[in-house]
Image: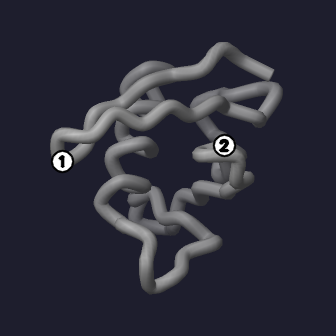
Amino acid sequence: MSLPLRITYNGQDYSYTIISKKIEIDITEIKIALNGEELTISRNYSGEWDIKETTISDEPGLFKAIAKNIALRYRL
């Protein structure tokens, strides 16, 4: 497991960890842990990142911000 990463979204700080062992440029799924919950972020055919386990109360903008943060960090 990696070190916790932080992101600020809508004025709130969130901490998440990347569970996926190997992140390469051609990866299509990344597993993360956010607030004790394991989530999977996947890349669709148009290159956008989406979360698989979404509910009505979740903020899709937060998940997209986390995916963008990971993509920028690992140059995906």
Q: Position of residue 38 (x, y in %)?
A: 73, 53
Where is residue 66, by image quadrant? Answer: top left
- Compared to residue 62, the image places residue 32 above or below, namely above
Instruction: Depth check: give the residue in front, 24 or 35.
Output: 35
- Report the mark closest to the observer, 1 or 2: 1
Q: Residue at point 70% right, 54% down?
A: 37
Q: Residue at point 38% right, 32% down?
A: 69
Q: Position of residue 63 (x, y in %)?
A: 43, 55
Q: Which residue is mark 2?
A: 32
Classify 10 Å Cα crowding around label 1: few (below 14), some (14-19), many (20 and above).
few
Question: Could you say which disc has been placed on residue 43 in the image?
Answer: none
Callout 2, which amino acid?
Ile
Callout 1, which amino acid?
Asn
**In the displayed image of the protein, which residue is found farthest to the left?**
11
Numbered marks: total: 2
Q: Which residue is mark 1?
A: 10
Where is residue 49, by image quadrant? Answer: bottom left
Quarter of the image for the N terminus: give it.
top right
**In the displayed image of the protein, which residue is found farthest to the bottom?**
56
